[in-house]
Amino acid sequence: MKRDVKSRSAIALLITVFFIMLITLSVGVGLKYINNASKSMQSEQFVLQSSMILDDVLKLLESSGELKAVTSADALAIFLAESSFIPFESNGVSVVIEISSARDRVNPNTLTTKPRIDAFKDYLILKMVNMEYADMLSDVIGGIKEDMSYNTDIFNQKPYLFRDYIASAKHLQELNDSYLKRYHENSLENIDMDELFHVSRDKNSSLDLNYATSSAWELMLGCNESRAEILSASGGTYAALDDLALSEIEKVSLNEFKTSFFEPYIYVKIEITQKDSTVNIAFEYDIQSKKGSNFVFEV
């Protein structure tokens, strides 16, 4: 049995190496076009060429046999361990590709039930943030209410704020700005929003417990930082609820959230730099459907 496990790990590792080679070669070809074009074009053309690199990455992900082989938690763990950071440079253009689980944090758009909102309010109390922040979030993801029965006055401040789901990190920042104007204090700095939230418009998405951040554990279980860090550090070894060694109270809390031990979604970040120009691209990729979503393109 041990030999079989070692053989599977070795094969998976080899497959992952091939993936890194392919993505480096594929994007490297695109870099040559950027280098040639940038000598005579301005930053707008650099951005256009960067979108071509994005196309190359998406096509490679779609055709990748290596990703097709990611059908289990073990396979995903090996893939992410070996492909999480891919840096390379060609003709003066630097490209860094980072790949991680796209289900490692709480999706704010899933905080739609009373138990989840209550858990979020408890988390806010621990972080010394006014609970009305949770009510603001509920308003922003709750859709348009003809009778104006919102929990807060956030839409008096921002009448044109999108109110169906959190669409992006910038959208979330607008919510944070409204909170700051309302309370004139900076308690939100007690929360690492990047570690707590990953924005996805899918309100039914599950969180992969093998990659859950410590902040995600704090919110779901209502536990302290030390307990959350232990659960997060042990990620990658979970296959069933019993592996978590939770108390009965913690099990009840976790049951209110939609979770699993294998979510075939990856989060891809691409940073392209040439001289003083930098383009950052990020998106979520569904391994099974071979589709990207929630694209962010920043210059």
Image: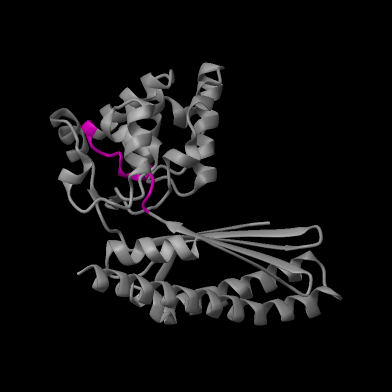
Return the x and y of residue 139 as percentages of the image width and height. 36, 34
Q: Is residue 179 above or below residue 34?
A: above
Q: Is residue 222 above or below residue 32?
A: above
Return the x and y of residue 297 as percentages of the image width and height. 59, 59
Could you tell me which residue is drawn at 33 percent across and 76 percent down?
A: 69
Q: Is residue 107 left or right of residue 47?
A: left
Could you tell me which residue is drawn at 62 percent across and 74 percent down?
A: 53
Q: Is residue 40 above or below residue 113?
A: below
Could you tell me which residue is drawn at 24 percent across and 73 percent down?
A: 4
Q: Main secondary structure of the magenta part?
A: loop
Q: Is residue 97 above or below residue 123?
A: below
Return the x and y of residue 14 as percentages of the image width and height. 43, 77
Q: Residue 40 occupies which quadrant of the picture?
A: bottom right
Q: Residue 81 occupies which quadrant of the picture?
A: bottom left
> Is residue 166 in the magenta section?
no
Task: Work out whether residue 138 can be spotted.
Answer: no
The image quadrant where one finds the C terminus is: bottom right
Q: Is residue 288 left or right of residue 162?
A: left
> Is residue 113 in the magenta section?
yes
Furthest-left residue in view?
Answer: 248
State the scheme by which the image is colored: one colour
Which residues make up the magenta segment? 103-115
Q: Nearer the viewer, residue 51 or 29?
A: 29
